[in-house]
Image: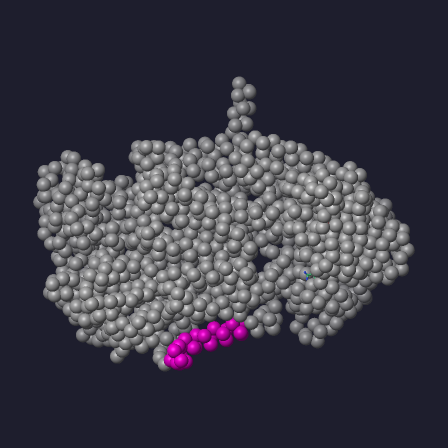
């Protein structure tokens, strides 16, 4: 009895089990929706939220761990979406090739772009990536053979292993992808890779002195971020069955940054929460509130206010709520406050 | 072959300012070598030139970390190499590690994780292996954790291993930086003002630690410090510089007797 | 494509509408007292200036109908939500309407990105969808017999391609242009207009063209205008909507291009004529097609109704008027079923039954699966605002089709 | 006893759950040099920052010349004539040496006085005069320290707070610093100094406090404490290494 | 006009180290206010602009008091995201407050143009350019030569230490936000005559202003002004002589390549951390 208990305890403490359980919980949503206990539209909103959580996870790795800010997320996500559509629908090569293309090509382009743009720092990098995103966006509008231009690209639910997917199945794929991404991210940040990224953010010079090849690791983080963005783009396409150029604009990139910041830098679950707050809360909560939901434009304003308020009260993101809760639960390890202060100092510099 | 580091004719200038002017000195095996000089004499600049944060205008920095080390770093067939022109992040591969004048640690990581960064170059598992958490990578991670704990134990701060580095007092952070250098199997450790901000008894502990490091790890130490008590206590050899130029060198006793050093640096003889 | 999806709809309606309510005559969102319809539109942020009046127009018409007791004893309830012009949000909203709220029809589906993302969903579900506030090509069909081909879609507003063709036809047919300059924006409106115009021009003998692209929303279009000027054209098509159109016109005037120009019907509003009339005064004329014709008595009556039922701030707002039109088209279908059973199929059949009168002039014929939106356009030109002409546009030509214009 | 310039009662400072200062009392008489000593992490810096309005004060009070300044904004504290050379130098990295000094004199209205302050600082630290148009971040460690001290002097403060002024300075310059302190004191400036260099500090100070783990541990006229060197040594030496193990010590 | 918007961004960046994404939206908001006053009350342009300036200043104050000031503990990115929230608020508020009808603004100088050879330049355009250069020059002098300038730069460099020096950093930041607001408003008023006043009319301005900032470098005030004019000229040139379809992409690509060569912009200095 007690041995099973400890084994179970160990299992429960394994973060990967946590992610799997999280995924399993999400998998019940299509069932709920199918049985009418939950609105089907909620399933769609949650699905898109999870897709954004995937992109945001990549950006969190970039921003939270490596301290690099990218405003090019939307462009790469769009590229993933269009590639998936092009390979699946125009070339007819099927789901797997489409996913592969959406993973590989943006990543390769991301790395190439990274080689150029990672030479510039901080704010310049942000805008350099914005430049790339704008170039991609303009290309989506113009390259009709590829994107169907401003009429928007249409696609279909994929056929996977001979099975015609439907909304619930694509949702399931999104969940699986998210769980894998969470696990992968966990592995990256809880090991040598993550430490090297940390070191790079805290002090580039010290990191170099410790033998961290800064450019390689920046590229690595950038590549992972584009990989996730490409994946998310493909999932977006399969879920929406369409892609429209102007979707992939600066505003989306900023929203993804907002998800990371609102959820909390360097927090895996926080990123999912952030995506939920930024994308789903306005849809599922604000628009359904009395008064606010009734006046056109008000929910939108309140989404903005929501972002501001969260950052005002939880400068470390909503993850901070978790930390505070944990600190209250066990006063044994009062660790995060000094770090906050230290982080402020870093930020102030 | 008994010289680990040979700095020859090093010069660098910033704009019109000649920060280093034809400076040469040599650090031997197992030696604790002190570099002293007035503020702005160029000591930190020497360190930066040796570790390639700055590209010197002229001069060479010969480093002889031992043949196996060179072979491991991909330089078979030589017994020393010129560090000038090497990328910064490669320098540590040869066994040359430094600390910083303004302690550089990662506040958001635990003390242990901070030390683990020091082992970065020796980490063998590929990125992929780490991302997939293959058994090999896990084993290596465990092995390095143990090594990092040892390093912390060596500096008597093992009990702080799991605390965040950010909240630690200055003294602990300095030790932490030192523990980090031990992870890289150093041949030469460069310390920039390790005693700054420490009180007298802590400084004494530091002297002891530096000697123990030298003896345990069989490496050399190159040290910049304004605390003459420490310098005179631990150093085997001292080189004094002023305005980027060589001023004097010798044993602590010789340096203390040197008039030029007194004029430029030490002032009245009432401290030490 | 028809075969696979044939089970969702049942052909051209006439055979199935009245009787078949079991398998083919699907129905939802309708009770003895109420009809539920919905749309999502961007009513916040950048597109609020279009979305908000549009919704107000729809609601205004429905209010008028409901005040008179509704249609066949049913009042019409209109649900709408803000999709922020985001296709993901729009798709979720549409799912909500169709599957959760179970509305009877979608009226005034709004915005290119959202419509493009959901047009397949609409076709799959078979839900009657009346009026699209966009002009994208996916809505166009010559003889849609199944929902998979878009039989359940009833576009009203001119599709940009159609309009582009008409603009070119006016240029050549009315103004005798032989070399037409096209300045188009890189958004859906601009490029579809451009495509329509170019395909029309290439089908006409002896007419040539040059074209320049500008960014939608660009503040500086001088390069494009200079190119057009240097090409020495004799007529200019300004394929741009909203803010970019005045930018281009002002630049044309500023650079002294001095050739008459035509722009999209979307721009035919007092706000736009205000924006440019001073600049072009005495330099050249700016024309714009219209798919409505206020000159008729019916149109004047409709305008009075419109102004009585929508917020006074939208009295001259074209987007509010299009909302009004959208609702009236939908209601027309319902009215045709008075006393009969209302199902999706019967509704679609009713829409095809006979051409439908646009309250502001013109008719649209959906019979035999035609889904082409408005096919005839009038022409008006910018004049200074006066008491006689409060809108700043003066009618020049009545509604005409391309063939009529080219004298075929 | 002359008027009290600065008086601190029961000061408590918390960073999140860490209690860095746990009830410190301290008096600085007008025109005196008072030393604040203690091991690493004893709470000296936190105390100085609290005086300047940079640390959040959880409990206790700080008054300056009879006026309560406990929760006063940093910028207003400075306007009262309190200047600080902070720990870690904190110079404006992307400003030149001269501009840095000018910020120090921000609260000084009179141009003549600013000019004379410049003269004085450049006289004390000729090295800074040589480097006056160099960007601060390129300075050496010691030069930065000089700049931080000089910048505080530029305000011609009536109360000068120095946090480890000798850090990173060459022995010769350290001697200069202590000489300068004596000179400043002679001009009537009150000084509260935090130092690791206990012996030398006690030599020029009038009175000294020793803190350990955030509490008053020992105080007395500096001359007496020098005599009692062994005692000082014991306190200064013990607290540093394992501060968190020392919790049982209370006065 | 890009120059002015860019200046506003730089001003906020220099004082708060926050990338001001809402610059365009705030300019849009106060610019719309100008148009609203002008169209509804028939007030002359200059009076409307004054009202707009008041609105812009009030907005700057409001944003600083209500939001930025309370963000002491937030990171720079956090603050940047707050400016994103502000975009949504202003974009949402504008149609609700000022109605959804597109509005118009006349030019300051209605007509007349200068012709130099083939090129021509309207007097209004000339005014815009002069104003841009003059404001940039004024800001430059203010920043480099005056005490307020020093206070601004010190605040940007290290806010806490600046307070320690007795610099009223709050007033400095509020000033910067208000000034940025006015600059945004001016940019809006200049650009408005060329188009209509809608919630989106400042979008390209925002993006172009950001590009102007990197092109010119964030460290100086004249850099971004230079960058803005360069982008305008090069953009036109590329579209005229290369391709109206791909000209813009090409321009962006060039900016990117330029950054490769000069990672800190035209007149930027490298800022190396010294160890
Ligand atoms: N990047 C640089 N640009 C301009 N001057 C520099 C730069 N780096 C160093 N200097 C100048 O070179 C001189 C030597 O600096 P360095 O930091 O080596 O001195 P140091 O001997 O370490 O002094 P300290 O003991 O004060 O730390 C100083 O006067 C400094 O101002
Ligand atoms: N910003 C902060 N956040 C969290 N903890 C802090 C912070 N600043 C100081 N501390 C903690 O408060 C305690 C007192 O610190 P303080 O800097 O006041 O000590 P000190 O006496 O000046 O030490 P030192 O000699 O190292 O300068 C230390 O344990 C330190 O780790
Ligand atoms: Mg140094
Ligand atoms: Mg201290």
Residue D49 image point, x, y percent: 67, 55
Up the image or down, A237 lies above or below C155; here it is above
Q: Residue at x 54, y 34 (%)?
A: B133
Please name the predominant secondary structure of the magenta segment in the image.
helix
Q: Residue at x 50, y 38 (%)?
A: A184
Up the image or down, D30 lies above or below C226; here it is above
Residue D59 image point, x, y percent: 64, 50
Residue B163 image point, x, y percent: 64, 40
Q: Is residue A111 left or right of residue B98?
A: left
Magenta highlight range: E113-139
Nearest the eye: A343 or A90: A90
**Residue D193 appears in which quarter of the rendering?**
bottom right
Quadrant of the drawing holding the C terminus of chain A: bottom right
Q: Extreme top residue here?
A: A1
Residue E191 image point, x, y percent: 39, 69
Whether residue D153 is visible, yes or no, is no
Nearest the eye: D219 or B193: B193
**Number of numbered markers:** 0
Whether residue B84 is visible, yes or no, is yes
Nearest the eye: B78 or E60: B78
Up the image or down, E205 lies above or below C17; here it is below
**Residue C301 appears in which quarter of the rendering?**
bottom left
Q: Residue at x 29, y 50 (%)?
A: C116
Q: Residue at x 64, y 48 (%)?
A: B89
Nearest the eye: C17 or A29: C17
| Residue C83 among magenta residues | no
| Residue E119 among magenta residues | yes
- The colour scheme used here is one colour
Q: Is residue E158 left or right of residue B255?
A: left
**Residue E208 appears in which quarter of the rendering?**
bottom left
């Amino acid at each position: 009895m007690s041995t099973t208990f400890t084994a179970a305890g160990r299992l429960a403490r394994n973060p990967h089990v946590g992610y799997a359980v999280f995924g399993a919980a999400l998998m019940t949503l299509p069932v709920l929706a199918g049985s009418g206990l939950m609105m089907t539209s909620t399933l769609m909103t949650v699905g898109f939220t999870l897709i954004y959580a995937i992109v945001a996870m990549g950006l969190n790795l970039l921003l939270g761990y490596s301290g690099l800010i990218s405003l090019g997320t939307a462009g790469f996500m769009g590229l993933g979406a269009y590639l998936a559509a092009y390979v699946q629908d125009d070339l007819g090569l099927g789901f797997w090739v489409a996913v592969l293309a959406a993973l590989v090509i943006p990543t390769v382009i991301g790395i190439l772009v990274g080689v150029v743009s990672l030479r510039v720092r901080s704010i310049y990098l942000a805008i350099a990536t914005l430049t790339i995103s704008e170039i991609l966006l303009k290309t989506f509008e113009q390259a009709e053979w590829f994107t169907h231009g401003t009429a928007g690209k249409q696609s279909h639910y994929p056929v996977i292993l001979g099975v015609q997917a439907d909304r619930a199945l694509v949702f399931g794929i999104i969940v699986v992808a998210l769980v894998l991404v969470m696990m992968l991210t966990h592995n990256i940040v809880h090991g040598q890779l993550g430490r090297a990224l940390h070191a790079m953010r805290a002090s580039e010079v010290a990191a170099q002195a410790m033998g961290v090849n800064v450019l390689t690791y920046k590229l690595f983080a950038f590549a992972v971020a584009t990989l996730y963005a490409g994946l998310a783009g493909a999932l977006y396409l399969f879920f929406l069955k369409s892609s429209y150029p102007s979707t992939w604009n600066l505003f989306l990139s900023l929203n993804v940054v907002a998800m990371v910041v609102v959820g909390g830098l360097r927090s895996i679950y926080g990123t999912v929460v952030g995506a939920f707050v930024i994308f789903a809360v306005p849809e599922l909560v604000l628009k359904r509130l009395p008064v606010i939901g009734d006046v056109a434009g008000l929910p939108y304003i309140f989404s903005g206010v929501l972002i501001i308020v969260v950052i005002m009260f939880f400068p470390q993101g909503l993850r901070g709520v978790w930390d505070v809760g944990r600190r209250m639960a066990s006063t044994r390890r009062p660790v995060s406050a000094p770090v906050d202060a230290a982080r402020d100092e870093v930020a102030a510099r | 072959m008994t010289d680990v580091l040979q700095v020859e004719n090093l010069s660098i200038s910033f704009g019109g300012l000649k920060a280093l002017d034809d400076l040469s000195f040599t650090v031997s095996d197992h030696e604790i070598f002190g570099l002293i000089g007035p503020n702005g004499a160029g000591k930190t600049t020497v360190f930066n030139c040796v570790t390639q944060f700055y590209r010197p205008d002229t001069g060479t920095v010969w480093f002889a970390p031992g043949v196996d080390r060179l072979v491991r770093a991909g330089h078979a067939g030589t017994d020393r190499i010129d560090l000038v022109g090497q990328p910064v992040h490669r320098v540590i591969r040869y066994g040359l590690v430094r600390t910083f004048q303004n302690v550089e640690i990662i506040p958001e990581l635990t003390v242990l994780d901070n030390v683990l960064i020091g082992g970065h170059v020796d980490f063998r598992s590929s990125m992929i292996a780490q991302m997939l958490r293959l058994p090999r990578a896990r084993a290596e991670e465990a092995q390095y954790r143990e090594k990092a704990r040892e390093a912390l134990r060596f500096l008597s701060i093992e009990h702080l291993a799991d605390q965040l580095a950010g909240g630690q007092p200055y003294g602990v952070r300095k030790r932490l930086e030192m523990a980090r250098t031990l992870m890289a199997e150093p041949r030469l450790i460069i310390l920039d003002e390790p005693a700054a901000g420490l009180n007298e008894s802590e400084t004494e502990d530091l002297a002891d630690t530096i000697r123990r490091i030298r003896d345990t790890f069989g490496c050399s130490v190159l040290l910049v410090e304004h605390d003459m008590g420490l310098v005179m206590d631990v150093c085997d050899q001292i080189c004094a510089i002023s305005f980027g130029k060589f001023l004097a060198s010798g044993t602590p006793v010789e340096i203390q007797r040197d008039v030029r050093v007194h004029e430029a640096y030490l002032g009245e003889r009432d401290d030490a | 494509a028809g075969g696979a999806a044939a089970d969702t709809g049942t052909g051209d309606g006439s055979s199935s509408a009245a009787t078949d309510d079991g398998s083919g005559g699907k129905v939802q969102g309708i009770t003895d007292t109420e009809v539920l319809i919905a749309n999502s539109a961007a009513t916040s942020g950048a597109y609020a200036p279009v979305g908000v009046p549009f919704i107000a127009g729809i609601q205004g018409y429905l209010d008028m109908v409901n005040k008179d007791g509704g249609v066949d004893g049913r009042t019409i309830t209109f649900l709408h939500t803000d999709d922020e012009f985001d296709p993901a949000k729009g798709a979720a909203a549409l799912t909500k309407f169709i599957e959760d709220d179970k509305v009877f029809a979608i009226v005034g589906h709004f915005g290119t990105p959202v419509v493009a993302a959901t047009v397949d969903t609409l076709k799959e579900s078979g839900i009657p969808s009346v009026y699209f506030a966009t002009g994208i090509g996916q809505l166009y069909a010559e003889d849609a017999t199944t929902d998979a081909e878009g039989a359940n879609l009833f576009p009203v507003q001119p599709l940009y391609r159609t309009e582009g063709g008409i603009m070119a036809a006016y240029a050549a047919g009315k103004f005798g242009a032989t070399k037409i300059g096209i300045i188009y924006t890189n958004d859906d409106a601009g490029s579809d207009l451009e495509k329509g115009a170019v395909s029309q021009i290439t089908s006409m003998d002896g007419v040539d063209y040059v074209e320049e692209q500008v960014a939608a929303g660009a503040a500086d279009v001088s390069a494009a205008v200079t190119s057009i000027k240097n090409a020495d054209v004799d007529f200019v098509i300004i394929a741009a909507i909203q803010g970019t159109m005045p930018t281009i016109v002002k630049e044309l005037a500023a650079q002294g291009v001095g050739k008459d120009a035509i722009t999209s019907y979307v721009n035919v509003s007092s706000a736009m004529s205000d924006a440019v009339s001073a600049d072009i005064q005495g330099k050249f004329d700016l024309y714009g097609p219209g798919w409505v014709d206020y000159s008729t008595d019916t149109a004047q009556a409709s305008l009075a109704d419109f102004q009585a039922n929508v917020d006074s701030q939208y009295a001259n707002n074209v987007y509010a008027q299009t909302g009004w039109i959208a609702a009236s088209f939908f209601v027309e279908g319902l009215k045709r079923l008075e006393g009969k059973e209302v199902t999706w199929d019967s509704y679609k059949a009713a829409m095809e039954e006979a051409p439908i009168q646009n309250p502001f002039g013109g008719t649209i014929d959906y019979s035999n699966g035609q889904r082409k939106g408005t096919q005839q356009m009038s022409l008006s030109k910018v004049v200074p605002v006066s008491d006689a002409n409060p809108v700043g546009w003066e009618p020049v030509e009545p509604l005409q089709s391309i063939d009529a214009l080219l004298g075929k | 006893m002359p008027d009290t310039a600065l008086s601190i009662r029961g000061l408590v400072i918390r960073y999140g759950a860490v209690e860095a200062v746990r009830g410190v009392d301290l008096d600085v008489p007008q025109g005196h040099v008072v030393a604040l000593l203690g091991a690493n992490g004893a709470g000296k810096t936190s105390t100085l920052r609290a005086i300047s309005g940079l640390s959040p004060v959880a409990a206790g009070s700080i008054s300056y010349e009879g006026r309560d300044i406990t929760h006063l904004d940093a910028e207003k504290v400075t306007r009262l004539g309190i200047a600080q050379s902070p720990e870690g130098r904190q110079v404006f990295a992307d400003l030149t040496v001269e501009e840095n000094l000018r910020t120090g004199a921000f609260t000084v209205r009179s141009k003549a006085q600013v000019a004379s302050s410049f003269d004085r600082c450049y006289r004390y630290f000729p090295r800074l005069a040589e480097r006056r148009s160099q960007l601060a971040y390129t300075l050496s460690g010691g030069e930065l320290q000089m700049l931080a001290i000089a910048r505080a002097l530029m305000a011609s403060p009536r109360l000068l707070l120095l946090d480890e002024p000798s850090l990173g300075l060459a022995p010769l310059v350290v001697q200069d610093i202590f000489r300068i302190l004596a000179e400043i004191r002679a001009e009537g400036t009150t000084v509260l100094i935090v130092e690791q260099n206990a012996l030398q500090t006690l030599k020029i100070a009038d009175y000294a406090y020793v803190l350990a783990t955030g509490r008053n541990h020992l105080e007395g006229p500096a001359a007496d404490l020098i005599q009692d060197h062994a005692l000082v040594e014991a306190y200064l030496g013990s607290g540093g290494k394992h501060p968190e193990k020392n919790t049982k010590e209370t006065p | 006009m890009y120059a002015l918007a860019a200046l506003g961004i730089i001003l906020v960046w220099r004082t708060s180290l926050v990338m001001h994404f809402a610059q365009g939206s705030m300019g849009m908001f106060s610019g719309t206010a100008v148009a609203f006053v002008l169209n509804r009350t028939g007030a002359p342009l200059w009076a409307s602009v004054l009202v707009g300036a008041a609105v812009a200043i009030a907005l700057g104050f409001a944003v600083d008091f209500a939001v930025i000031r309370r963000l002491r503990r937030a990171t720079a990115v956090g603050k940047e995201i707050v400016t994103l929230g502000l975009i949504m608020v202003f974009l949402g508020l504008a149609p609700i407050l000022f109605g959804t009808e597109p509005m118009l603004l006349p030019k300051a100088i209605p007509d007349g143009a200068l012709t130099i050879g083939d090129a021509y330049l309207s007097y209004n355009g000339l005014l815009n350019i002069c104003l841009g250069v003059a404001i940039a020059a004024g800001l430059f002098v203010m920043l480099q030569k005056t005490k307020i300038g020093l206070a601004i730069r010190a605040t940007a460099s290290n806010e806490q230490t600046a307070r320690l020096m007795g610099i009223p950093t709050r007033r400095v930041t509020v000033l910067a936000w208000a000034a940025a607001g006015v600059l945004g408003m001016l940019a809006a008023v200049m650009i408005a005559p060329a188009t209509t006043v809608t919630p989106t009319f400042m979008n390209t301005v925002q993006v172009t202003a950001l590009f102007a900032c990197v092109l010119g470098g964030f460290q100086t005030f004249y850099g971004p002004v230079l960058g803005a004019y360069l982008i305008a000229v090069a953009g036109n040139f590329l579209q005229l002589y290369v391709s109206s379809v791909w000209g813009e992409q090409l321009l962006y690509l060039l900016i990117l390549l330029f950054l490769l060569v000069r990672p800190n912009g035209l007149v930027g200095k490298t800022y190396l951390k010294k160890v």
